[in-house]
Amino acid sequence: MAVSVSLSRFAGDLQMANRAHKTIQQYIASARRFEEYLGHDLGEASQEAVRCWVDVLRQQAIGASRLGLHYAALKFLYARTLGQPEKVAWITIPKAKAPLPSILARAEIQRLLAGFTTAKYRMFFTLIYATGLRIAEASQLETRDIDAMQQVIHVRDGKGGKDRLVPMKAKLYGLLRSYYKHEQPAKPWLFASKAGNPICPETARRALLCAAAASGIGKIVNPHLLRHAFATHLLESGEDLRKIQVVLGHSSIKSTQIYTQVAPSQIAAIRSPLEDLPD
């Protein structure tokens, strides 16, 4: 089926809105499914046709997060691209219940990092744990992003196209210097493939799974788990939640507050008023 005018405009508007590449792909795939269901251009759909499509989606065995993605695609398509907001004004995007992230203890982090057999991947994931970077952000780092004078790392074009700074203390800087001197990655990258390209996130994920298996920690490990550990361990050390939000690149403090639910030491540190009552 050829790409319709509406679908083409939709793709362009998503790019103009600076949506993430993955989000654009998902929204377009969702809209294309709806267009195939309709059998004609999306702009010609009635509100009743949109309602019927939503009913089809609701009958499928998909979670609230996936359903919300389809709804968000519809709302963007009709409210912004096609200028027909009345067709989707009634749609309410469901809220997915956010599960508490699994957390690795400090001892488990040590065992995990020791499980790597390749220095490049050990350093790559050490950096992620030390800074809370997303794997996509870490894979695109260049040597110019390392600011030894200010003791920070510049994250360029992070999630949402935003730049930010993350801390780089002496221990991390020393490890990076030793790694770079030994590995000599292809310029300008801090972590590069043998072909001279930025390190492949998927290859790095496989190396992480192998290290997790070798460490014997018995948990399902992914790169984001190291980011969770970074935030939780900072919170347990008494770091300010607002500062953690900035370093993680969260646009809302609500995204960062989930870590207050997985840091038991923060709860245990609260003094009960019972303690102040006389015996």
Image (spheres, grey):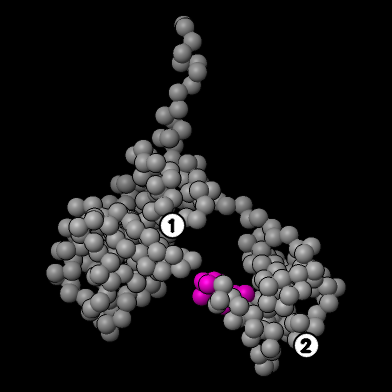
In this picture, is 131 found above or below 157?
above
Residue 114 is left or right of residue 132, and the answer is left
Q: Say left or right for 224 vs 4.
A: left
Determine the residue positioned at 17% across, 74% down.
184
Which residue is farthest right? 48
Choose between 233 and 4: the one closer to the eye.
4
Give the x, y percent position of residue 275. Answer: 46, 16
Q: Secondary structure at mark 2?
A: loop
- How far apart are the two marked residues, 1 and 2, measured between alpha carbons? 41 Å
Amino acid under disc 2: His
Find residue 249 and name its label.
1
Q: Position of residue 68 (x, y in %)?
A: 66, 63
Instruction: Report the residue marked by disc 2.
Output: 40
20 in the magenta segment:
yes
Decide which of tag 1 and tag 2 comes sooner along the chain.
Answer: 2
Examine the rendering and report whether any part of residue 263 can be seen: yes
Magenta residues, dominant SS class: helix
Task: Tell me which segment is drawn in magenta.
Answer: 18-27
Kindly identify the amino acid type of the residue bearing the numbered disc 1. Gly
Residue 147: name its quadrant. bottom left
- Which residue lies at the image location 71% right of the left edge and 71% below the top edge? 79
Q: Quadrant of residue 202?
A: bottom left
**Horizontal and vertical percent for residue 5?**
69, 88
